[in-house]
Image (cartoon, rainbow, N blue to C red):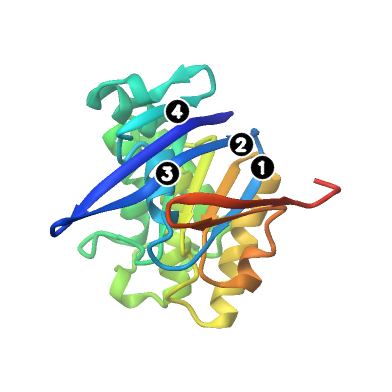
């Protein structure tokens, strides 16, 4: 599904260049479940941004299925991102003036889906994620775990093939975090490719394949024998 070839990205931090990605080669098959670990500044979030087409490499190539997305212009990348990729962030990024239902529905509004179709798909997710009683609540009326479930519902409402999660349990207590990670794993079990950045070794070890990064390089790629 994904192939990266010699991907590089350098940022300028004051007068100093920082090599966020340093000649990264990586292949990810459809339906895989990966965690990406490493110290702060190792390049984990930069890698996730590249996979999500939120940033472009300085050099190297990126294929998503059979499309070399690293060669696309901004508008074409945005179209591929909208069609194929969902994002879950540590800070939720919900719109505070919109209800849970409206936050989940927003991607379908932006892509012009019919109102009846939007309602049916949102209702299905609200029920599945145990949010149906909170559909009309604003984000500040929800717990952290509920807000993250709303964010996950919004990320998967368009049925993406690839789900990218950046510290999805970082703002949650252990009980809420357990529920969120189990939900992400359930979605992976249904065929969504899941790539999760985490600082939590216990959370990272749950993935069937584990990548470690340091100084912009992939230094270890470990996979369960039965995966």
Residue on which disc 3 sits: 22
Residue plotted at (13% across, 59% down): 14
Q: How much space separates mark 3 and mark 1, taking CA atoms?
A: 23 Å
**Percent position of residue 25, x then y:** 54, 36
Q: How much space separates mark 2 and mark 4, taking CA atoms?
A: 11 Å
Q: Which residue lies furthest to the right in this view?
A: 226
Mark 2 in CB contact with mark 3 (< 8 angstroms): no
Judged from the image, the secondary structure of the residue bearing numbered disc 3 is strand
Judged from the image, the secondary structure of the residue bearing numbered disc 4 is strand
Q: Check the picture and name the quadrant holding the N terminus.
A: top right
Residue on which disc 1 sits: 32
Q: How much space separates mark 2 and mark 3, taking CA atoms?
A: 18 Å
Judged from the image, the secondary structure of the residue bearing numbered disc 2 is strand
- On residue 62, which mark appears? 4
**Which mark is in front, 2 or 3?**
3
- On residue 205, which mark appears? none
Judged from the image, the secondary structure of the residue bearing numbered disc 1 is loop
**Which mark is in front, 4 or 3?**
3
Q: How much space separates mark 4 and mark 1, taking CA atoms?
A: 18 Å
């Amino acid at each position: 599904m994904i192939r990266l070839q010699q991907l590089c990205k350098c940022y300028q931090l004051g007068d100093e260049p920082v090599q966020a990605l340093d000649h990264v080669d990586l292949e990810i098959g459809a339906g895989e479940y990966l965690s990406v670990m490493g110290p702060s500044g190792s390049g984990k979030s930069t890698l996730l941004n590249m996979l999500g087409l939120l940033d472009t490499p300085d050099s190297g190539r990126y294929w998503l299925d059979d499309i070399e997305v690293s060669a696309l212009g901004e508008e074409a990348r945005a179209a591929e991102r909208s069609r194929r990729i969902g994002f879950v962030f540590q800070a939720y990024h919900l719109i505070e003036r919109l209800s849970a239902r409206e936050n989940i529905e927003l991607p379908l509004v932006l892509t012009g889906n019919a109102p009846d179709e939007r309602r049916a798909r949102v209702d299905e997710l609200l029920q599945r994620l145990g949010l149906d009683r909170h559909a009309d609540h604003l984000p500040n009326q929800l717990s952290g775990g509920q807000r993250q479930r709303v964010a996950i519902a919004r990320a998967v409402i368009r049925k993406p093939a690839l789900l990218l999660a950046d510290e999805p349990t970082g703002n949650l207590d252990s009980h809420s975090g357990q529920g969120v990670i189990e939900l992400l794993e359930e979605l992976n079990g249904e065929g969504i490719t899941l790539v999760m950045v985490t600082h939590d070794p216990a959370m990272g070890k749950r993935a069937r394949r584990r990548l470690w990064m340091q100084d912009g390089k992939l230094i270890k790629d470990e996979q369960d024998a039965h995966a």
